[in-house]
Image: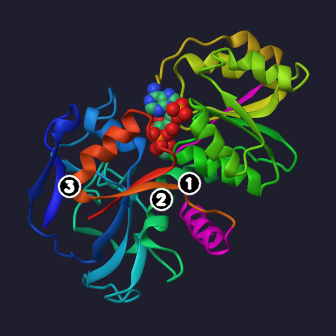
């Protein structure tokens, strides 16, 4: 079968399209014919390598997989060959820790993948493979960060940085679904116009307003917003602390632009801020997301769909911030 492998960390040229052996379903596993695989910024980190997060190489990336059951391993009775499924990317590793498909084990940038059968979520016919493959890592994480960890309430004012990306477009829709007033921040007018169409109430261009904290405080009579969602890190961190209101929350699930930013602790104690980390999703979050898509409450934003041989281009689009929503690969 065809697959995209990473043999060594580095640039786009380290993504190699190859022929490899098709997997066989072991006991308790299924082989899935991959119809769609969503790319995430995680795939960029896996390709580049991140200090402190060792990746075994070679690795096939891609954690967000939707497809059709192709083969059943021994002892798998609750699924059928030909059934449409979304795969929960969270897997238990041999050391007992939870890891992700495409990061800690083989991913879905391939024609077939073997996964634990318990990770399959039945996919209704009215949710496309592409829409489903947009959900787990980005929208699942946004769901847990905003709903479970962030406890967003109707009427709260929520600033979302990097709102145009995968987690971001999910976060905007989930915050709107909760009845919040959404301040969407992005780097271009084009992205902001699309965020407005997605439901954002207030638009913040942080290229034109590099001191976006002043701008946001100005919009809120100097008070700041109830919640800031910041998975960008870098030089946006202290500015984010500055535009949360007294008693507000700052939510984070990542650090696209830098994981060890300068901080300013004064803002945390003087404004009695809660800084809440969020990592990944629960199975139930994914089931609720599929239901929300079926009900039309969430519409996964797909920037473009590319064939497997264009995986490098998909990575480039994410790395160069040229994406609005998700890039989906169809092996
Ligand atoms: N902990 C978890 O479980 C978990 C799960 C999913 C994602 N994450 C993390 O969340 C972050 C976002 O992931 P994603 O998949 O949504 O990424 P994405 O689709 O590439 O979106 C990231 C957005 O951030 C903005 N951005 C700001 N500075 C950037 C930079 N230096 N490089 C690239 N983009 C930058 C971009 O929008 P503008 O150009 O408009 O600024 C971009 O649209 C990543 O750090 C990822 O690792 C964590």
| CA–CA distance in space, label 1 to label 3 | 25 Å
Instruction: Tell me if residue 51 comes above or below residue 182 in the rendering.
Output: above
Quadrant, the C terminus: bottom left
Asked if the residue at label 1 sits under 8 Å from ligand 1, the reply is no
Q: Secondary structure at mark 1?
A: helix
Visible residue check, residue 228: yes
| CA–CA distance in space, label 2 to label 3 | 19 Å
Instruction: Tell me if residue 219 comes above or below residue 160 in the rendering.
Output: above
Q: Residues within 10 Å of mark 3 (few under 14, many from 20)?
A: some
- Observer-side mark, 2 or 3, equals 3
Q: Which mark is residue 139?
A: 1
| Among numbered discs 1 and 2, the one appearing first in the sequence | 2
| CA–CA distance in space, label 1 to label 2 | 7 Å
| 274 in the magenta segment | yes
Q: Secondary structure at mark 2?
A: loop
Q: Which mark is residue 134?
A: 2
The quadrant holding residue 233 is: top right
Q: Residues within 10 Å of mark 2 (few under 14, many from 20)?
A: many
| Among numbered discs 1 and 3, the one appearing first in the sequence | 1
Q: Are marks 1 and 2 in contact (CB under 8 Å)?
A: yes
Q: Secondary structure at mark 3?
A: helix
Of residues 174 and 50, the one drawn nearer to the viewer in this rendering: 174
């Amino acid at each position: 079968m065809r697959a995209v492998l990473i043999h060594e960390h580095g640039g786009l040229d380290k993504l190699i399209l190859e022929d490899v052996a098709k997997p066989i379903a072991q006991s308790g596993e299924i082989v899935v014919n991959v119809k769609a695989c969503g790319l995430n910024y995680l795939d960029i980190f896996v390709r580049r390598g991140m200090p402190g997060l060792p990746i075994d190489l070679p690795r096939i990336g891609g954690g967000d997989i939707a497809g059709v059951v192709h083969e059943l391993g021994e002892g798998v009775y609750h699924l059928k060959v030909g059934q449409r499924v979304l795969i929960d990317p969270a897997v238990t590793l041999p050391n007992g820790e939870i890891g992700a498909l495409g990061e800690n084990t083989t991913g879905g940038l391939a024609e077939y993948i073997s996964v634990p059968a318990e990770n399959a979520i039945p996919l209704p016919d009215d949710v496309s493979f592409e829409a489903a493959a947009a959900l787990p890592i980005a929208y699942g994480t946004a769901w847990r960060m905003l709903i479970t960890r962030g406890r967003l309430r109707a009427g709260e004012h929520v600033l979302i940085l990097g709102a145009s990306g995968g987690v971001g477009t999910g976060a905007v829709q989930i915050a709107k679904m909760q009845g919040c007033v959404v301040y969407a921040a992005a780097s271009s007018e084009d992205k902001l116009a699309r965020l407005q169409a997605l439901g954002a109430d207030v638009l913040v261009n942080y290229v034109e307003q590099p001191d976006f904290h002043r701008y946001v405080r100005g919009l809120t009579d100097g008070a700041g917003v109830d919640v800031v969602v910041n998975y960008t890190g870098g030089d946006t961190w202290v500015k984010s602390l500055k535009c949360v209101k007294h008693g507000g929350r700052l939510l984070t699930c990542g650090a696209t632009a830098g994981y060890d930013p300068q901080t300013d602790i004064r803002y945390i104690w003087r404004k009695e801020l809660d800084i809440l980390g969020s990592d990944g999703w629960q199975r139930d979050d994914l089931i609720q997301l599929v239901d929300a898509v079926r009900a039309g409450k969430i519409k996964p934003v797909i920037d473009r769909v590319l064939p497997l041989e264009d995986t490098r281009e998909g990575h480039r689009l994410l790395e160069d911030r040229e994406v609005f929503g998700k890039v989906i690969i169809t092996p």
